[in-house]
């Protein structure tokens, strides 16, 4: 045991060991391009594959949103610059370069689907989880590397099916990302069937991923890595994996049923006597539209925590690292994450107050919804308190992590009125809801994801991303995000509904001057204002994109395997980590956040630094 | 690079990786079928009074199928036990039995499906309903042009509700005979496919999904029985684990049937 421990290489200020120099064991030869990048079973490559695809999808989803914002601000006016291109690609629905209402609906449905299922979940869970979790727990790889690869391929196929649906006659799904029946069955396009097949593939992908993550965390923790020594990021991913494992299958069931409705002609979600276009349909009837909503939101609400928990995990790591002190309330954080995960399964019907559910049921879900805010507030409070008294290092990842805290706070607190049935009846389906959940996921989760990209980039490439452009990226994104979403609260409170392809112009005071609840001109003007802020937000991402690619080959080289001077095991590996990750099996002897421990020369003590080896290691350095 | 605990147990969890993996997978399967069963409950309690079918499925065939799957669960267990005591010959025999039982199950299931697709309910222009199995369609039978006739073996009822409970004394007494129905008399003709009503819809969906699981399980067992059994010679312990893990899946699929059978056939 003792000799084993002493084999650890000193970790400080050692020039980064590059993986491809380390292949001296002769056990495997350099794999070819296909095996290395497409059919790789290495969790790090799969993580990067996921991350790259997810970032591409997020950019695509963002462009859909820009087109929609143009349509909202200038209904029926041809889209400048991209209009002719749209008409060329999509034909009739984009006639004269303008966005038809049907196309707007497609874009709306696909923006939501792409951002949630092809953007944020793959990036937050699959990409960061795949890359970082095995490193953090000291594992050589995931437990099931080939299933991991299959998971990525299922995700990729799902993405392809979703994208292909734009080009079929009738276009992509138009019933919103929630795909409520009977709308989703009666719209005359096969886009919905594509959507469902795509979703089944994506659900398969996250199922395989979730099984892999849980098995990895349970089975492959390094010696000494007890549950309460896991970095909180790992806990967050662990709970997320359980949510994905158990909440997604009911949506898969719902997807199968809706696919039967759309393709085979069953009536699971079609009520008796449903009339479409003035004529009673051929369906047998007897189905229940509410059944879809229940099954959908049984996934839909836990999904919110799939989006937010990994993001919180990233923020926790970045904050602990940059405040140079232990995370405040580690145990509360762990139990809060578990509690959130459990409770997220019994709040779903707060999305359905408008369906005429009984007051008793509404009261139950109202109560659980209020209760679930408690652990979320605990988590956020722990992170705020972690800042107290720290000697904070401000760098790009830290800026994004700090930006996350108030943004997620706004998103969370504005959710409370929506959780109360009485207030929700008024605010339901307005822009207030849009603003609320975008604050949670856009300046919230996505900021945390940016923090993660900037934070782990040096581990992935051996180079840092440019700090100056990182800060430009942060401040511009921060400003424009708020200008985009803050006005939507006001619009929503004034009664502007979501999902209207004309930007609510038909309900404005200029069109219906005598209606007492017509939308005033100021609300309508905000549409134009938001459009320009959204364009600004798009421009603000250019420094990030260039920085990301430029830094792979030109960024400042890191002078150590542990450039952020972090305690967790992911930084105690060669840079980038080779296949198999660790040069020796790490033996963990302490908790994850031993920063500024008294009696140590350095202000951080890695989890695997031998207890009695600490003193010689520091003197060796000086 | 080698992943730890692919074969041996991790001391503190007492599990090898694949065993934990398959239990997690089964947990998600429980949620999948759980979602479908709750759909069944909601559709059934939401059905119009008297419009939820009873006795539409053949209890004898269902019972035989239940027995087949129960037997296959036993042979699966014995196949694993044979691997445990390193008796490869017995393993081969037992899992061959499992596959034969599975194929017999699927055969009976297909027969039941075929029966439903040949079973027609015809709404007649005079307001009554003809119901029965298709005997033949005349060569010139065409609903749109109202030519030809269709022959059913069945009976005619005044009200659709009479077709709902086939366990009722009235339904038992009904006299079935050959009916020749001209196309001109037909308002709507539909077989008992998934589109017939919400019962057939959920029946076909759930039993179909279950049959797909049977098929998938059979393919896995076939692989482990045939080409995959080479591992027995090189790494018998790991091979035995594979048999155990696939067996766990198989038992789960059996268990789903144990719920499906009473819910669909007996109530």
Image (tube, rainbow, N blue to C red):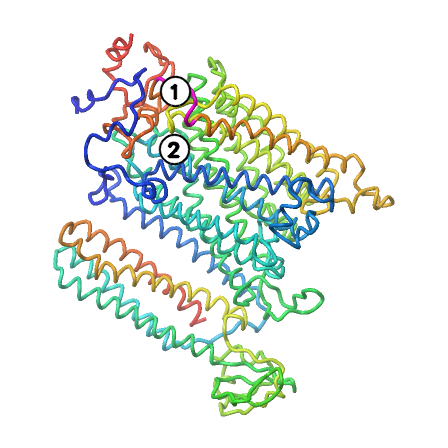
> Is A558 colored magenta in this rendering?
yes
- For the residue pair A508 and A325, the one nearer the viewer reads as A508
Q: SS of the residue at dot 1?
A: strand
Q: Which mark is residue B36?
A: none
Looking at the image, is A196 positioned above or below residue A436? below
Tally of marks: 2
Q: Position of residue B243 (x, y in %)?
A: 23, 56
- What is the chain identity of the residue bearing mark 1? A
Mark 1 sits on what residue? Answer: A557
Q: Position of residue A528 (x, y in %)?
A: 73, 35
From which residue to which does the magenta span run?
A552-559
Q: Residues within 10 Å of mark 2 (few under 14, many from 20)?
A: many
Residue drawn at x 58%, y 50% is A178
Mark 1 Cα-neighbour bin, 10 Å: few <14, some 14–19, many ≥20: some
Q: Which mark is residue A234?
A: 2
Q: Position of residue A232 (x, y in %)?
A: 40, 29
Query: Which residue lies most toward the right here?
Result: A514
């Amino acid at each position: 045991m003792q000799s084993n421990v002493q084999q650890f290489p000193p970790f400080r200020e050692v020039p980064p060991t590059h993986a491809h120099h380390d292949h001296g064991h002769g056990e495997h030869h350099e794999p070819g391009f296909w095996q290395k990048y497409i059919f790789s079973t290495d969790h790090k490559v799969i993580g990067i594959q996921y991350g790259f695809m997810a970032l591409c999808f997020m950019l695509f989803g963002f462009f859909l949103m820009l087109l929609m914002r143009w349509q909202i601000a200038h209904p029926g006016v041809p889209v400048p610059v991209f209009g002719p291109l749209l008409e060329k690609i999509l034909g009739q629905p984009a006639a004269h370069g303008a966005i038809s209402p049907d196309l707007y609906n497609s874009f709306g449905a696909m923006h939501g689907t792409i951002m949630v299922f092809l953007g944020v979940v793959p990036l937050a869970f699959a990409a960061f989880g795949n890359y970082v979790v095995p490193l953090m727990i000291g594992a050589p790889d995931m437990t099931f590397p080939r299933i991991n690869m299959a998971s990525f391929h299922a995700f990729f196929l799902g993405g392809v099916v979703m994208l292909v649906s734009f080009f079929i006659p009738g276009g992509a799904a138009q019933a919103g990302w929630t795909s409520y029946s009977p709308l989703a069955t009666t719209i005359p396009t096969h886009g919905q069937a594509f959507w469902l097949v795509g979703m089944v593939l994506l659900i398969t992908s996250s199922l395989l991923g979730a099984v892999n993550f849980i098995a990895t965390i349970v089975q492959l923790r390094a010696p000494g890595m007890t549950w309460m020594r896991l970095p909180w990021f790992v806990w967050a991913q662990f709970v997320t994996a359980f949510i994905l494992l158990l909440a997604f299958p009911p949506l898969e069931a719902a997807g199968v049923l809706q696919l039967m409705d759309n393709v085979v002609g069953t009536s699971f979600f079609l009520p008796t006597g449903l009339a479409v276009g003035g004529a009673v349909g051929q369906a047998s009837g007897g189905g229940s539209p509410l059944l879809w909503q229940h099954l959908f939101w049984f996934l839909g609400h836990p999904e919110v925590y799939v989006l937010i928990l990994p993001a919180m995990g990233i923020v926790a790591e970045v904050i602990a690292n940059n405040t140079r002190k232990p995370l405040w309330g580690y145990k509360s954080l762990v139990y809060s994450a578990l509690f959130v995960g459990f409770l997220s399964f019994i709040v779903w019907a707060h999305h359905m107050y408008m369906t005429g559910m009984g007051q008793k049921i509404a009261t139950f879900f109202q109560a659980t919804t209020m209760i679930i805010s408690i652990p979320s507030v605990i988590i956020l409070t722990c992170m705020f308190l972690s800042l107290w008294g720290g000697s904070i290092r401000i760098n790009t990842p830290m800026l994004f992590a700090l930006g996350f805290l108030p943004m997620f706070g706004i998103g969370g607190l504005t959710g409370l009125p929506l959780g109360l049935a009485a207030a929700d009846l008024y605010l339901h389906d307005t822009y207030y809801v849009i603003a609320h959940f975008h604050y949670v996921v856009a300046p919230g989760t996505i900021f945390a994801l940016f923090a993660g990209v900037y934070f782990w980039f040096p581990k992935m490439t051996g180079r840092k991303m440019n700090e100056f452009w990182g800060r430009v990226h942060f401040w511009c994104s921060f400003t424009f995000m708020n200008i985009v979403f803050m006005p939507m609260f006001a619009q929503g409170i004034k009664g502007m509904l979501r999902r209207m392809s004309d930007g609510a112009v038909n309900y404005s005071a200029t069109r219906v001057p005598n209606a007492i609840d017509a939308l005033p001109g100021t609300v309508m003007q905000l549409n134009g204002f938001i459009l320009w802020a959204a364009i600004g937000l798009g421009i603000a991402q250019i420094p990030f994109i260039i920085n990301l690619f430029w830094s792979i080959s030109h960024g400042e080289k890191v002078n150590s395997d542990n450039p952020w001077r972090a305690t967790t095991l992911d930084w105690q590996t060669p840079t980038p980590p080779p296949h198999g990750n660790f040069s020796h099996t790490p033996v963990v002897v302490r908790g994850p956040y031993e920063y500024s421990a008294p009696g140590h020369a350095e202000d951080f003590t890695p989890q695997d630094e031998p207890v009695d080896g600490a003193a010689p290691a520091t003197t060796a350095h000086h | 690079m080698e992943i730890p605990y692919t074969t041996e147990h991790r001391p503190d969890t007492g599990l090898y990786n694949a065993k934990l993996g398959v239990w997690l997978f089964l947990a998600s399967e429980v949620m999948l079928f759980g979602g479908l069963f709750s759909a069944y409950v909601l559709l059934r309690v939401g059905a119009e009074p008297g419009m939820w079918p009873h006795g539409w499925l053949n209890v004898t065939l269902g019972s035989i199928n239940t027995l087949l799957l129960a037997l296959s669960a036993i042979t699966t267990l014995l196949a694993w036990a044979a691997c445990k005591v390193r008796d490869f010959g017995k393993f081969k025999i037992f899992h061959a039995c499992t596959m034969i039982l599975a194929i017999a199950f699927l055969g009976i299931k297909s027969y039941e499906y075929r029966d439903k697709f040949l079973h027609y309910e015809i709404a007649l222009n005079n307001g009554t309903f003809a119901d029965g199995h298709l005997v033949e369609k005349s060569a010139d039978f065409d609903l749109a042009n109202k030519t030809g006739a269709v022959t059913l073996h069945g009976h005619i009822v005044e009200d659709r509700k009479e077709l709902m409970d086939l366990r009722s004394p009235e339904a038992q007494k009904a006299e079935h005979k050959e009916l020749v129905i001209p196309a001109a008399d037909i308002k709507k003709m539909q077989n008992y496919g998934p589109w017939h009503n919400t019962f057939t819809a959920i029946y076909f969906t759930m039993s179909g999904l279950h049959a797909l699981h049977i098929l998938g399980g059979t393919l896995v067992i076939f692989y482990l029985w045939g080409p995959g059994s080479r591992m027995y010679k090189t790494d018998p312990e790991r091979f035995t684990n594979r048999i155990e893990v696939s067996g766990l899946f198989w038992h789960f699929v059996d268990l789903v049937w144990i719920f499906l059978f009473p819910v669909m056939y007996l109530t």
